[in-house]
Image (cartoon, grey):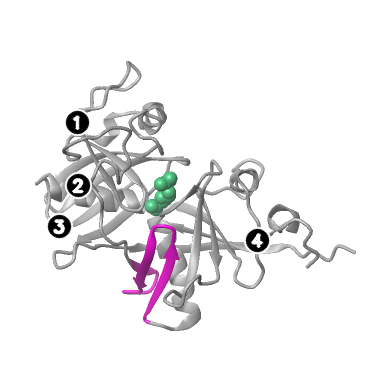
Amino acid sequence: MNKARPIPFRKMNGLGNDFVVLDARAHPVALDSAAVRAIADRETGVGCDQLIVVAPPTSGDMDAFMAIWNNDGSEVDACGNATRCVADLLISETGKPEVVIGTNAGLLRCTRPGEGLATVDMGTPRFRWDEIPLARPVEDTRAVVLDTGPEVPELGPASLVNVGNPHCIFWVGDVAAYDLARFGPVLEHHPIFPERANISLAHVADEGHIVLSVWERGAGLTRACGTAACAVAVAAARNGLAGRKVRVTLPGGDLSLDWRESDGHILMTGPLSYDYEGTLPASTVEPAGTDA
Ligand SMILES: N[C@@H](CCC[C@H](N)C(=O)O)C(=O)O
């Protein structure tokens, strides 16, 4: 007899960047791209920008491991906003002042500076062309001219950086003046990015404040993207456009970024919220043959 029970999930968000969070620590889940797309579908599934699986630690130096899937079914290494959400879950559960989350992009240390807030140490950015990665050598990733067709407006040179995932940033005078939803997909799939890229339009309002709009790889236009905020903060400082501590305003709200002088780590602080809880039919996420 199939005794499979429904799988509980939490719906959470960081500045409106929204996640279905599955806790696979007690009961494993098996996901493939098709299952992720079905759950993430806003018409026929739960709907989310990313699906997050909290799994048991894979080594003694972490509290849990976190797997990240975009809503197009691609698995990725980093998600800043979801890391804050999972950090809050683990801090509430353990009572520890600091938790360590394992990701495919490395170990991330997280704290709770106030109720409903989390700070994540996103580690150090990478700037070399083969670390971003790019399809061809580029000497200086601070300002790269991309060949684009008529569907992309004149945006000037891009700054490229990897903060656990690849980001491409264009510096503009007014982010609202551009229809990023129209040409974001073209840039995401530009041949210079063998793993595609997250595409940002950034306006430096002053040396401590940047306004940002993001077309996320594998998810489209989102209300916020934590790693894009990290990427734009370090790229602005590296280009001499802003200081190392900046406020980044996204459509969903503000994040505080500190590209720490002492060790080059990026600290990202911002809010997170719990939306609701629900259950998924076991058949959507259980390993084949499970009779749990
Ligand atoms: N929403 C995220 C980023 C999620 C992954 C990204 N779309 C990618 O494919 O790299 C964030 O808050 O950082």
Q: Which residue is mark 4?
A: 29
Identify the secondary structure beneath mark 4: loop
Q: Nearer the viewer, mark 1 or mark 3?
A: 1
Q: Position of residue 8 (x, y in %)?
A: 66, 64
192 up-or-down from 64: above or below = above
Q: Earlier in the sequence, mark 4 or mark 3?
A: 4
Residue 104 left/right relative to 134: right
Q: Are marks 1 and 2 in contact (CB under 8 Å)?
A: no
Residue 244 badge: 3
Q: What is the count of numbered marks? A: 4
Residue 18 left/right relative to 279: left
Span of residues in magenta: 97-119
Identify the secondary structure beneath mark 2: helix
Q: Which residue is mark 2?
A: 235
Q: Position of residue 282 (x, y in %)?
A: 74, 59
Residue 157 badge: 1
Residue at figure coordinates x 36%, y 81% from the top left: 97
Query: Is-magenta flag for residue 102?
Result: yes
- Mark pair 3, 2: CA separation: 10 Å
Query: Is-magenta flag for residue 198?
Result: no
- Check disc 3 and give the amino acid type: Arg
Specify few, some or many for label 3: CA neighbours under 10 Å numbering under 14, 14-19, or 20 or more. many
Q: Are marks 1 and 3 in contact (CB under 8 Å)?
A: no
